[in-house]
Image (cartoon, grey):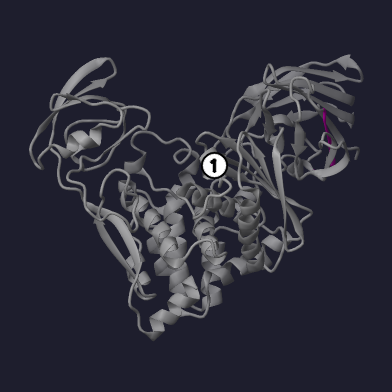
């Protein structure tokens, strides 16, 4: 079968990728389709909506295009077929495509139609360099196999099949490239955007994180290279995993500058993001749920196991910072406390189970609204704490750890690209440990019962206590333990004095306030951006206060009765422990 040939050129002024697809010998009525979603991000995104000016020829003559559905079409005739179309690229996330005078980026799922029947064919991709006058100094970075490229990386690449074609994102800009070796595998951190980081420290810290993860999985898989393709912005954060790379967004001030010492919160968060996406090299990209592997990316693929693939990865991301020596045990426990606090402050944990949260990701997680905290639970956050509880249970009652389970998932499934059936981790944990874990899993995954976090941590010499928050900036862990004076149960938007969320069974809910309302005044004093907490401090608990607010274009008034803050903030500390607990803690935390 002849390779499918794609050519991409750039029009950065119009934010357009100009795409040509060539088939040497296509069958009668050849069908072409774009994905509706991309692996690792569980929302139907309908990439075809960005396609413009689609034209086709068959054997050199203009061909009619018959639309089949929103993402697919058929061409009449057979023989040599050519498609020409444009893709509007102005989505700054890691999930789609972007092009302007400073930077270009795309996932193949946004640009490349797959000819039906050619899924296992080779795909040849040629990317033309942009006008040097418009885009001076641009280079290209991708983990796709090179065929013939210039010194800047523009030219021809080859993918073994369609899945590989869309699993190698492409970054283009006048970027910085920080190269480092991890156990014989070349790695690169590509930074697009204005920044002046400490490149030596970044290389050293990322090397340590990648090393301990590769060590966990026995230095497998062997890779040609691995890329961290990173867009640096004012305040961005996020990532999407791929088979030999990841696409990241980070805030400029999250990167360490030369001369800065210590592990600042922003940099700690960036390292956690790097660790999370790198762990997906195994858990998702190779240890893959059967339900997702079977999907042709046309419609939703449902699984109750997303907590395994995102939650367990979220457990390991900060845990690997500890193992790499970038965090000490008290700092790591603070991060666990912050996760436990986020869960504790989510009324939806008592409404939606973890299994249902995984299954309903397609309609809930990626489409939050004003009632999300009251109606659902985050499978990243609760999933990470469920993975922690599983790890502690295994360590407490057997000689098995979650490390052993992850390695077994790798050797039985991931190493040979064999998808994992539903409930695979549950069954494997029971098999390896010899324990009946059904009650634990039923409680953690299929009910809304509280996790046995405090009880398990106590067996490892870690004291877990709940206290009231010291203010809106208190995310949990050690710190200022003085409680705030009052609590109303509403969360404001960061940009203004509008309400983002009103929590269930709170004073704000009883006052009739709702998400989207814009606060105007509290007891006759104007509410401005950042002033709400100060105004609350002047009130008296249980005494009604008058709130004026806009709902739509109407000015309304209500009575709000603030109360003392609830104990919803976790603190985890190393406690005095006997020999047995101390040894358990040493094996877990080092």
Q: Is residue 344 left or right of 486 when viewed as pictured?
A: right
Residue at label 1? 238
User: Residue 244, how many percent across, how many down?
Assistant: 71, 50
Residue 358 can be seen in this image:
yes
Other-residue count near label 1 (Cα within 10 Å), few / some / many at <14 / 14–19 / ≥20? some
- Which residue is the extreme one toward the front? 259
Residue that appears at 42% across and 36% down: 368
Q: Is residue 436 left or right of 411 when viewed as pictured?
A: left
- Residue at disc 1, secondary structure: strand
- As displayed, is residue 66 above or below residue 323? above
- As displayed, is residue 462 above or below residue 241? below
**Toward the viewer: 58 or 381?**
381
The N terminus sits in image quarter: top right
**Toward the viewer: 131 or 30?**
131
Q: How many numbered discs?
A: 1
Residue 396 can be seen in this image:
no
- Which residue is the extreme one toward the bottom? 579
Span highlighted in magenta in the image: 120-128
User: Residue 148, how many percent across, how many down?
Assistant: 90, 38
**Toward the viewer: 563 or 71?**
563
- Which of the 4 image quadrants contains residue 525? top left
Residue that appears at 57% across and 64% down: 324
Residue that appears at 47% across and 65% down: 328
User: Residue 357, how many percent across, how many down?
Assistant: 44, 48
User: Magenta segment: does it hold 122?
Assistant: yes
User: Residue 103, how many percent across, how many down?
Assistant: 67, 29
- Which of the 4 image quadrants contains residue 460? bottom left
User: Magenta segment: does it hold 121?
Assistant: yes
């Amino acid at each position: 079968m002849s390779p499918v040939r794609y050519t991409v050129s750039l029009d950065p002024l119009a934010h357009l990728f100009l795409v040509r697809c060539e088939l040497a010998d296509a069958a009668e009525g050849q069908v072409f389709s774009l994905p509706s979603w991309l692996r690792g991000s569980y929302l139907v995104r309908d990439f075809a909506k960005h396609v413009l000016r689609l034209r086709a020829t068959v054997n050199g003559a203009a061909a009619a295009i018959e639309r089949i559905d929103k993402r697919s079409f058929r061409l009449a005739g057979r023989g040599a077929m050519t498609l020409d179309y444009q893709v509007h690229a102005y989505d700054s996330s890691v999930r789609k495509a972007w092009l302007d005078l400073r930077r270009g980026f795309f996932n193949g799922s946004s640009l490349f139609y797959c000819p039906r029947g050619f899924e296992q064919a080779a795909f040849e991709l040629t990317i033309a360099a942009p006008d040097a006058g418009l885009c001076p100094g641009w280079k290209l970075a991708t983990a796709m196999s090179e065929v013939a490229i210039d010194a800047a990386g523009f030219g021809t690449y080859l993918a073994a099949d369609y899945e590989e074609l869309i699993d190698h994102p492409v970054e283009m800009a006048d970027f910085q490239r920080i190269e480092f070796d991890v156990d014989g595998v070349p790695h690169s951190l590509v930074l697009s955007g204005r920044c002046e980081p400490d490149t030596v420290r970044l290389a050293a810290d990322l090397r340590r994180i990648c090393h301990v993860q590769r060590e966990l999985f026995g230095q497998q898989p062997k890779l040609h290279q691995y890329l961290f393709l990173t867009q640096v912005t004012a305040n961005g954060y996020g990532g999407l995993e791929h088979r030999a790379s990841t696409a990241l967004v980070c805030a400029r001030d999250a990167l360490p500058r030369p001369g800065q010492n210590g592990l600042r919160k922003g940099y700690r968060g960036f390292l956690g993001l790097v660790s999370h996406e790198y762990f997906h090299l195994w858990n998702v990209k190779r240890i893959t749920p059967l339900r997702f592997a079977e999907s042709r990316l046309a419609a939703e693929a449902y699984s109750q196991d997303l907590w395994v693939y995102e939650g367990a990865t979220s457990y390991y991301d900060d845990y690997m910072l500890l193992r790499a020596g970038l965090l000490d045990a008290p700092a790591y426990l603070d991060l666990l406390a912050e996760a436990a606090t986020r869960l504790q402050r989510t009324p939806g944990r008592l409404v939606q189970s973890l299994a249902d949260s995984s299954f309903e990701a397609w309609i809930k997680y990626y489409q939050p609204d004003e009632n999300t905290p009251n109606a659902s639970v985050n499978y990243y956050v609760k999933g990470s704490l469920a993975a922690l509880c599983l790890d502690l249970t295994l360590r407490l009652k057997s000689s098995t750890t979650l490390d052993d389970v992850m390695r077994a998932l790798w050797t039985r499934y991931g190493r040979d690209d064999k998808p994992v059936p539903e409930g695979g981790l549950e069954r494997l944990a029971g098999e390896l440990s010899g324990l009946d874990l059904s009650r634990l899993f039923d409680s953690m995954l299929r009910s809304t019962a509280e996790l046995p976090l405090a009880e398990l941590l106590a067996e490892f010499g870690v004291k877990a206590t709940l206290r009231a928050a010291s203010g809106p900036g208190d995310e949990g862990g050690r710190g200022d333990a003085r409680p705030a004076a009052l609590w109303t149960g509403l969360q404001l938007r960061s940009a203004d004095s509008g309400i983002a969320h009103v929590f269930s069974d709170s004073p704000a809910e009883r006052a009739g306030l709702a998400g989207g309302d814009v606060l105007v005044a509290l007891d006759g004093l104007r509410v401005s951006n950042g002033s709400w907490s100060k105004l609350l401090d002047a009130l008296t608990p249980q005494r009604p206060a008058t709130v004026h607010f806009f709902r739509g274009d109407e000015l309304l008034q209500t009575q709000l009765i603030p109360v003392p803050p609830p104990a919803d903030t976790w603190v985890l500390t190393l406690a005095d422990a006997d020999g047995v607990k101390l040894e358990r803690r040493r094996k877990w935390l080092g």
